Image (tube, rainbow, N blue to C red):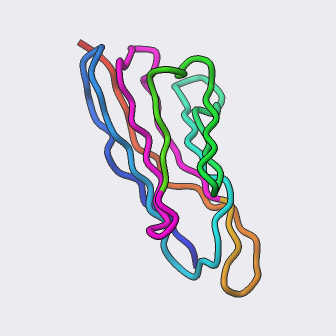
Amino acid sequence: QVQLVESGGGLVQPGGSLRLSCAASGSIFSIYTMGWYRQAPGKQRELVATITSGGTANYADSVKGRFTISRDNTRNTVWLQMNSLKPEDTAVYFCNAPLLTRKDAFVSPWGQGTQVTVSS
């Protein structure tokens, strides 16, 4: 069984920063591209950023220059550093980690979500 556990959300004022983390645990052989997504009330889940196992990052236009995604393959962990936060960044943030288990099964688990609220 594979599990993703997220942490780091909270309430922050506009212009502030937060750092989200997501750790994968369980019978993991390798993790492919890891990603952060978000879902605001009444809206569809959208891509925020992804990072390949080799470290190539991709960002949604709305967060470019403000957010930075990083990962540590030895710790099966991905982070999202969020700077210059705006009220429109308010959402529940989810991580996703498609991976191959030690039993050669492909799974694509999601984290439980962490709330980020940007408000004065």
Q: Is residue 103 above or below residue 120?
A: below
Is residue 98 toward the left or the right of residue 115 in the image? Answer: right
- Residue 46 at x, y = what percent? 64, 31
**Nearer to me, 39 or 96:** 96
Residue at position x 68%, y 60% from top? Answer: 32
Q: Quadrant of residue 107?
A: bottom right
Q: Is residue 93 above or below residue 120?
A: below
The magenta stretch is: 72-97
Residue at position x 44%, y 22% from top? Answer: 66
Does the magenta portion include 95?
Answer: yes
Is residue 64 toward the left or the right of residue 66 in the image? Answer: right
Does the magenta portion include 35?
Answer: no
Q: Is residue 90 above or below residue 19?
A: above
- Residue 40 at x, y = what percent? 52, 26
- Residue 119 at x, y = what percent? 29, 16
Residue at position x 42%, y 24% from top? Answer: 90
Is residue 97 toward the left or the right of residue 72 in the image? Answer: right
Q: Is residue 26 above or below residue 116?
A: below
- Residue 85 at x, y = what percent? 37, 19
Is residue 73 toward the left or the right of residue 104 in the image? Answer: left
Quarter occupied by the N terminus: bottom right
Residue at position x 41%, y 53% from top? Answer: 6
Q: Quadrant of residue 56?
A: top right
Figure disc tally: 0
Quarter occupied by the C terminus: top left
